Image (cartoon, rainbow, N blue to C red):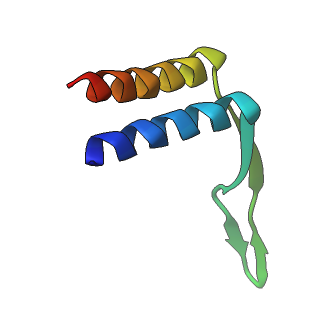
Amino acid sequence: MIYMIVAIILIGVGILGLVYTHFNFTKDTHGASLGPFNLSVKENQTINVPTWAGVASIALGAAMLLFKSFS
């Protein structure tokens, strides 16, 4: 049962990886305190999801479902 759940999650993650090819997040970096003034820097980071990773995840999930159904 857990085997099928992992396979379905892999397929879902693979599909999401193909649909959303990248995602962004904001990272707080070092700040400085100068008396009453506080300085901080926020950086936008982008992470690209390779197409091969999405395809590999879908293929692995499908293979897991296929081989589990034969055994």
Vertical placement of residue 57 versus 42, above or below: above
Front-lying residue, 49 or 4: 4
Quadrant housing residue 49: top right
Eyeballing the image, is 53 above or below 1?
Answer: above
Kindly identify the residue that appears in the image at 46 percent across and 40 percent down.
8
**One can see residue 21 in this view:** no
Residue at 65 percent of width and 18 percent of height = 51
Residue 53 image position (x, y, % from top left): 55, 21
Q: Does 10 sit left or right of 37 as displayed?
A: left
Q: From the viewer's side, name the closer residue of 29 and 18.
A: 18
Residue 69 in the image: state x and y as whole percent.
31, 28
Q: Is residue 51 left or right of residue 12?
A: right
Task: Judge by depth and name the residue closer to the eye, 52 or 71.
Answer: 71
Q: Tell me which residue sits at (74%, 45%) in the image.
A: 24
- Give the residue furthest to the front: 70
Residue placed at 59% from the left, 24% from the top? 54
The C terminus, quarter of image: top left
